[in-house]
Image (cartoon, coloured by chain):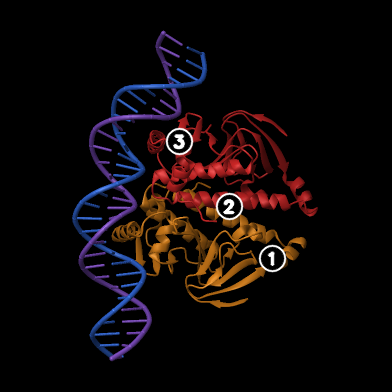
Chain colours: A orange, B red, C purple, D blue
Amino acid sequence: MVSPLHAGEYLYRAGTQVQGQYHIRSGMVKTFVITTTGEECVTGFYIAGEMLNSGRCSGVHRESAVALETVSLCRLDAQAIERLGSQGLSVAMLENQAQQASYEMMHQVNLRQTSAEKRFAGYCMQYGLRRVQLGLDEAVLPTPMSRTDLASYLGMKLESLSRVISRLQSRGLIAARRDQITVLQAAELAELANHLRY
Amino acid sequence: MVSPLHAGEYLYRAGTQVQGQYHIRSGMVKTFVITTTGEECVTGFYIAGEMLNSGRCSGVHRESAVALETVSLCRLDAQAIERLGSQGLSVAMLENQAQQASYEMMHQVNLRQTSAEKRFAGYCMQYGLRRVQLGLDEAVLPTPMSRTDLASYLGMKLESLSRVISRLQSRGLIAARRDQITVLQAAELAELANHLRY
DNA sequence: CGCGCTTTTGATTTTTGTCAACTAGGGTGG
DNA sequence: CCACCCTAGTTGACAAAAATCAAAAGCGCG
């Protein structure tokens, strides 16, 4: 257990040595990279109950991770993980990594949708899935990240995201507040999103 | 060593049990998923010298893998990998996975570029990087995949890709043949692409 | 040598980015 | 406690880019 972080504080920075993995107890964390033009590109959002295994626990962090709100977390340091591994306790860990990789792929596929609306709808579905996985309400999507961050994550400009949200809200598919999006018509939203067949 | 596959033959299909990992000796392999609308979405291209570790060697394949041309490959089955692991020989394997994850992230970031030209330029850079890593000429990019596959991989429509290629060719940045793209002005192409700062 | 497929090119529509103005909300200090 | 300010977000108008629809051109293969 690490002492809680406040919004804007870093869990780690890109380029530093990986110390271990972080299990998020509460709050949300974003990960991002910086491109050559200096733009921040948001690569992921992690919610309470999930594990950040950046770099897959070897070498150097490729992304930076920062708290979006007050975050409490547990750090499993690399040596402890290795010990667990040799005792065969790493099964859960491997499963978690596979799960994470699966989420990443869904997002990667979602990014290829050519319409901003589809990408946003896909994001809502995927977020819902992750919530279900953790035993939470899939219709309520806490949204502590800024619109700018979310837009970056979804490969669109802030204004486009804003318009998409407004449009879907006026159509009654979602209810949007600054810090929370509620899915009202999951079926219709799912139809918009071009999600993976499993 | 598995007997060579011809273009269109599958290495494995999504939903089947993971048997192990594949090291490609020659030829190119594409991986893809199918969305609920039945569209094929190309998630990766693998070149000779690289390793396909779909599912990270546990559980079920999330993607299908198919040969784009005649392909020869080695299969490392899961048990063999485990044996290696217990002997501490898995370091190279882990490094390979980290490498692969890094490529995936670069691609994920590249997919967020809002212009088709940037995404294509980014693809060329990344392909070049992978070639360098394998000791090959980074300027010559064998392209056995169809334009449709490449467009899917880059999150654009076939016609857009075709136009981008024509435009860059007429500007003298690349030379494009059906099955090979040659980078002529690497610096200018790199400037177009918004790649990661490392 | 033609046939079918993939790719390229053209014309048009739709979407998104861009620039700019306006609004809302949170925090600060009077 | 309220007014103000500053930032984040929304909305509008326009320009740019990509999707779409359609047709022509290459290219491999029988």
Front residue of this view, candidates B48 and A34: A34
Instruction: Report which quarter residue B151 is drawn in.
Output: top left
- Going by the image, does C15 lie left or right of A145? left
**Against C22, is B59 above or below?**
above
The answer to whether residue B160 shows anywhere in this view is: yes
Front residue of this view, candidates A187 and A35: A35
- Going by the image, does A29 lie left or right of C13? right
Q: Write down the residue under mark 2.
A: B102
Element assignment for label 2:
helix
Question: How far from the left and from the top, in percent, is residue A183?
Answer: 39, 62
Instruction: Report which quarter residue A159 is drawn in.
Output: bottom left
Give the CA separation, mark 1 to mark 3.
45 Å
Tag in front: 1 or 3: 3
Q: The numbered mark 3 sits on a residue in which chain? A: B
For label 3, the crowd category at 10 Å Cα-Cα, with few meaning under 14, some 14 to 19 and many 20 or more, is many
Question: How far from the left and from the top, in percent, is residue A168?
Answer: 32, 58
Q: Write down the residue under mark 3.
A: B174
Who comes first in sequence, dot 2 or dot 3? 2
Q: Write down the residue under mark 1.
A: A78
**Which residue is at the far right?**
B87
**Against C15, is B27 above or below?**
above
Give the CA separation, mark 2 to mark 3.
26 Å
Q: Amino acid at mark 3?
A: Ile
Q: The numbered mark 1 sits on a residue in which chain? A: A
Question: How far from the left and from the top, in percent, is residue A71?
Answer: 53, 74
Give the CA separation, mark 1 to mark 2.
20 Å
Q: Residue at x 58, y 73 (%)?
A: A73
Tag in front: 2 or 3: 3
The answer to whether the residue labelled 1 contacts the one labelled 2, judged by CB atoms less than 8 Å apart, is no
Element assignment for label 1:
helix
**Against A10, is B89 above or below?**
above
